[in-house]
Amino acid sequence: MTTQETRAETRSPGLMFPTGFVWGAATSAYQIEGAVAADGRGTSVWDTFVKRPGHVVGGENADVAIDHYNRYREDVRLMADLGLTAYRFSVSWPRIQPDGAGAVNAKGLDFYKRLVDELLAQGVDPWLTLYHWDLPQALEDAGGWPARDTASRFADFAALVHDALADRVRNWSTVNEPWCAAFLGYASGEHAPGRREPAAAVRAAHHLNLAHGLSVQAMRAQRADSRIGGCVNLYAVSPATGSEADRDAARRIDGLQNRFFLDALLKGTYPEDVLEDLRAVTDTDFVQDGDLALIGAPLDVLLVNYYSRFTVSGAPGGARSAAAAPTDSGSPWVGSEHVGFVNGGRPVTAMGWEIDDSGLYELLTRLARDYPSVPLVISENGAAFDDELTGDGRVHDLERLSYIDAHLRTCHAAIEAGVPLQGYFAWSLMDNFEWAWGYGKRFGLVYVDYPTQRRVLKDSALWYAETARHGGLPGAAE
């Protein structure tokens, strides 16, 4: 595939992004790699979870996924053809430490060395995420994230990976979306390991934050020039009405989803109102002296994942459509299980998530206003739609193209308003295994024909490639 073949029609952008703005796309190890038993890889909680009936739509699994482990060179060439300046990926903890502790599995680590070398050779900057939810099963058997020792094991793992790759990888993030790992994994049971233990979920959330702090400390001790950040998934949260119950519901969900993690990472504290909301479920004796200072140590960058807005109600019997899970699960909203999620009347994606780019502007300007100044990067933003490969051999995904266009315009507006936004990563580079949804939800810029593993550039990929090459957007929405 040549650059010319991937190029969309030439255009003159009217909204230019700052010089050096990062144009990237993102993936995660478990969703794309496959090869779950190759070269000494251990078992992760997701390998266990997908084998339990009823946990994944259609009983699907990621044993093969999109075979990136064997096709990474082809995939990196595709990134280069698309003109991406950066690629955000995660490493598989059980591929590097099969039991979550002890010596490095050299063959597993060598895969990431080859991947990084290939990226650099193709002019694509590697952005490495240390943890995207694939906890080694041995550590879950020992207690998982509710156990404090897991955070220490993670710091050891981070140091091993950083020591091996920091000479070639400058940009590092620690834990991807700790809210999901804690509350979907240990409260609702929608994600691996599938536990429904609200008090354990709160402990897990703190220990995921602690893992971030310990790993930052370990990596900074090795090299001072690594650029290290945390990664949080944030939502704009609105009350359904102006009633006291709905306003309190918005405070609660904003607190547990956003402020619990932002305050910890950027202020070194937990919000008192959120701790009060949780008090009926658990005390906080697991927060030890010095933890929050460690968690709140200065960051080089904050990575922000944004998809949608929440509209919430505290009225009895509130609808839960906006937070629906694909399979039977409990509530992830520990201490606020009564809160309902209502449709705000906006268009939705195939996930049922409302499309609202104004929420991204609201979040970015809030971060710049309310938190200590830190450079920001959109590390995930994208949408699932019901894509089809048409008779002309293409995927005409205008809805996704429009979604990304609108959110990039919002990013530009935020930069104009003074927000220190330095980059954007589309989620995701390719269609892949979408956790409990299996393969039925496609987020990719690149279509994957799963039976053949053939990659096909969607119209959104062609458009994004042109946007990245020109460093800006047309003056009016296309």
Image (spheres, rainbow, N blue to C red):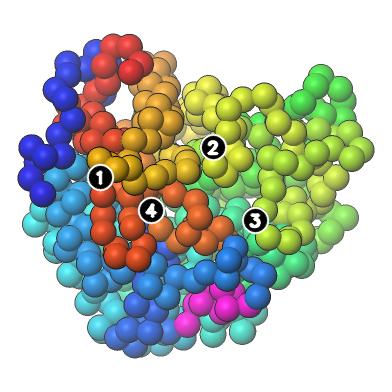
Circle number at residue 205: none
Q: Identify the element where label 1 is drawn.
A: loop
Instruction: Please name the residue that numbered disc 4 is placed on.
Output: 431
Circle number at residue 393: 1
Disc 2 marks a residue whose amino acid type is Thr
Q: Identify the element where label 3 is drawn.
A: loop
Give neighbour class at mark 3: few <14, some 14-19, many 20+ (Cα, 10 Å): some
Instruction: Please name the residue that numbered disc 3 is placed on.
Output: 326
Q: Identify the element where label 4 is drawn.
A: loop
Tell me the quarter of the picture where residue 423 sits. top left
At x 48%, y 59%, the residue is 439
At x 24%, y 13%, the residue is 14
> Residue 306's spot in the image, x, y percent?
50, 38
At x 72%, y 41%, the residue is 321
> Residue 122's spot in the image, x, y percent?
10, 53
Pointer 3 and pointer 2: residues touching (CB < 8 Å)?
A: no
Instruction: Please name the residue that numbered disc 2 is placed on.
Output: 349
Give neighbour class at mark 4: few <14, some 14-19, many 20+ (Cα, 10 Å): many
* Start-end of magenta stretch: 43-52
Pointer 4 and pointer 2: residues touching (CB < 8 Å)?
A: no
First reached walking from the N terminus: tag 2 or tag 1: 2
Disc 3 marks a residue whose amino acid type is Pro
> Residue 111's spot in the image, x, y percent?
24, 74
- In the rendered image, the vertical position of residue 93 relative to residue 352, given as above or below: below
C-alpha span from label 4 to label 2: 15 Å
**Image position of 168 (left or right of 344):** left
Number of numbered labels in the structure image = 4
Q: Does the magenta stretch include residue 46?
A: yes
Pointer 2 and pointer 1: residues touching (CB < 8 Å)?
A: no
